[in-house]
Image (tube, rainbow, N blue to C red):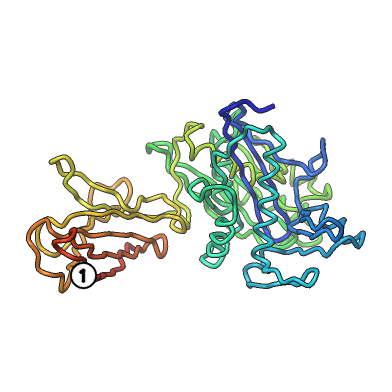
Amino acid sequence: MAEYGQQLYIGIDLNDSYAMVSFAMTQHLEPETVSTVAGSEMFQIPLAVCLAASSGQWVYGDEAVRFEKAEMGKCESNLLSRALERDFTIIQNQTYEIRSLLAVFIKKLLLLAGKLGPHMEIGKVVFTFSKLNPKLMELMEYVFAQLPVARKRITVMDYMESFYYYALNQKDGLSTHDVVMFQYYGKNILCWYLTRSKQSQPQLIQIIEKDCGYLTENKDQDFAEIIPKLFKKKIISSVYLVGDGFEGGWMKHSLRVMCQGRRAFLGKNLFTKGACYAAEIYDGLLPWNYAYMGENEMKFNISLKVRKNNEMAFHTLISAGDNWYEAQGECETVLDGPGEIDFWLQLPRSRQARIETLELTNLPSRPKKATRLHIQAKPLSDRSVKITIRDLGLGEFFKASGMVWEHVMKVN
């Protein structure tokens, strides 16, 4: 039975075919992946739900598939792609949006936590996807609103970032030097090469993607020839192989080449475990001395210079390194001077800042410190942020004008 006060940390790998779920607890920090069959490594839970004809209850995953085969209900699968297209279905004469069924599926996944004990609270949930894009985020915001978890406890990332968290949490020297992942799903092999700058604090992490091309029928020999070219003059601690293309026992010569001075692992649940590690790190449970700037992370800081307790200080609206799909900053401030505001744009680890001054055109004339403003910063990409400023006036004496100023700030 779980102890009172324990927090649960969940990493969910979600794609159109299946989901995988890993969890860790405050007192058991190493992630474990949920298997659909006790004692096995059947981690993939089909992304499907079925409304049981007899009970009217939703079942999911393998059980949903079995119910349809037994003609006990209609199974709805491929929920992610269909939800993205705003598809719908009719079950027992009732119309359902597929995005609502996706929310039902994810609720069921979260209920797996109930099996760990009745007093478990969710500390953080991290979802990981192959790629992030605005359309996917719009869908997931709808889904998140249906879940019994506060939005502030939910984070999203892509597979590359999950790999970053997984690789750098491995012990026994597996991340002493560079780390490589190969992905092979029967098409071209992709290589992700993780390297770090040990001179910086925190250590800066870079992941480089390379398309290794298509393997012919002689896959073992082809792969064995690719490896030395990629690894030339590089010190690599570990290699991870992900994807069903690596199954079948065909890697004989290539595996010997790969394991010369390094260790290799065939993984099925790497991304879900990486997301689970991230959930713990976000909550401060694990030490972390790394900084990763992937394609989803903000590339600059935006701050305001404000007076606080009679001293000048910087108030950060957007921080470099935050996921731009989720980042948002806002504050209220009283204008102390002419109708303009200075924003400080700064690259991480740079002492130089660029100041952009926004003029509040046609702002009503008021005495000094008689104008209250609401300022919101919302990223449009990893290198651009939309600033929205609203005039709130000041109490009964100086009514809000309703005026709004918008501006987009960018860095190259």
Residue 210 lies in quadrant: bottom right
| 76, 279: nearer the viewer | 76
- Note whether 26 is above or below 13 in the view shown: above
Report the residue at 71% width, 44% height from top. 267
Q: Decide which of 190, 119 is in the foreground and name it.
A: 119
Q: Quadrant of residue 369?
A: bottom left
Image: 389 above or below 22: below
Q: Amino acid at mark 1?
A: Ser
Residue sitting at x 19%, y 50%? 305
Q: Position of residue 120 (x, y in %)?
A: 62, 34
Q: Nearer the viewer, residue 207 or 386?
A: 386
**Based on the displayed image, in which of its 4 quarters is residue 129 positioned?**
bottom right
Return the residue nearer the eye: 247 or 303: 303
Residue 259 can be seen in this image: no
| Callout 1 secondary element | loop
In the figure, is residue 243 to the left or right of 343? right
Name, please, the residue furthest toward the right: 70
Q: Is residue 44 above or below residue 50?
A: above
Seen from this angle, which residue lies furthest front?
Answer: 396
Q: Tag 1: Cα neighbours inside 10 Å, few (<14), some, or many (≥20)?
A: few
Image location (x, y in percent) of residue 35: 77, 42
Q: Which residue is mark 1?
A: 401
**Coordinates of residue 135 in the picture (x, y in percent):** 54, 67
